[in-house]
Image (cartoon, helix red, strand yellow):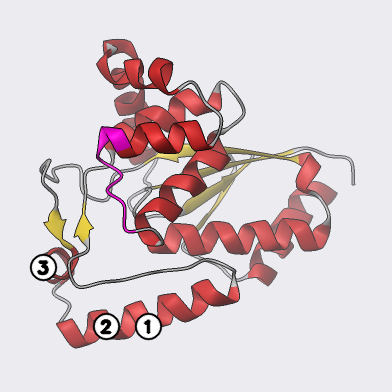
Amino acid sequence: MSKKLKIDIVSDVVCPWCTIGYKRLEKALAELGVQEQIEIEWQPFELNPNMPFEGQNVTEHIAEKYGSTLEQQKETQKRMIEIGEELGFKFDYFDDMRMVNTFEAHVLLDYAKDFGKQTELKMALTKAFFSERKDVSDRDVLKQILLEVGLNADEALLRLYDEYSVNEVKVKQEYWKNLGVNSVPTMVFNRKNALTGAQSVDTFKQVVLEFMNN
């Protein structure tokens, strides 16, 4: 198999199923040994575009948005923690955890694409939020993460003040929404077929093989 495969992953930084979905895809690609033939591009999606600057308690937010009881939330979190452990990712849920606005994180992910560091930054942001109890809407935190992945933090943060860069992310969000993407993760293979949700490793392997063998 010498074909190249482009995978667009529409997702949000604070979406646990997006993390699980990517880790399963990563495992599938490793098991197939085709990592070098895959191009991944992360596309912006905000689960909570109207989230205020101060954020909102996660338990309160999930109850308001999805009508989930505390018991249901605890059960879901327990399941996520177990799945995360299987995939080598730590979900650390805690009582004062806050859902935050992620728009600026998406602007920085767009910047990272120019340097081939998009996946690295994406996973660093996700880890900061879910594993390290960090606020990924805080610019000091964002600066620290940019530095950790070897990007020019000062240059990157200037993008947040650049009208064109900000608008570019909004345009991309609208593009995927107009194509009917309304839940994440959504993974689009060669801009032809899409898979929604955190599919199994075997499902990802099957889809990747189909594209690379045809």
Question: What is the spatial separation of the Cα atoms under label 3 and label 2, in whole angstroms?
Answer: 13 Å
The secondary element bearing badge 3 is classed as helix
Residue bearing the label numbered 2? 74
> Which amino acid, by three-letter code, is at mark 2?
Lys
What's the magenta region? 133-140
Is there CB contact under 8 Å for labels 1 and 3?
no
Crowd band around label 2 with a 10 angstrom C-alpha radius: few (<14), some (14–19), many (20+): some
Compared across the picture, whether 29 is left or right of 160 comes to right
In the displayed orientation, state which residue is furthest to the right. 1
Query: Residue 142: horizontal and vertical position, in percent?
Result: 35, 36
The reply to whether callout 2 and callout 1 are in contact (CB within 8 Å) is: yes
Residue at the image point whose x is 55% and y is 56% from the top? 22
Position above or below: 47 against 28 = above
Q: Report the residue at 69% width, 62% height from top.
A: 27
Q: Residue at x 51, y 27 (%)?
A: 112
Mark 2, secondary structure of its residue: helix
Give the CA separation, mark 1 to mark 3. 18 Å
- The answer to which quarter of the image holds residue 43 is top left
Task: Classify residue 181 as left or right of residue 194.
Answer: left
Which kind of residue does numbered mark 1 sit on?
Lys
Please report whichever mark, 1 or 3, sits nearer to the chain's N-terminal start.
3
Q: Which residue is mark 1?
A: 78
Quote the CA–CA distance across marks 2 and 1: 6 Å
The mark found on residue 214 in the picture is none
* 148 horizontally vs 54: left or right: right
User: Residue 103: x, y in percent?
Assistant: 27, 35
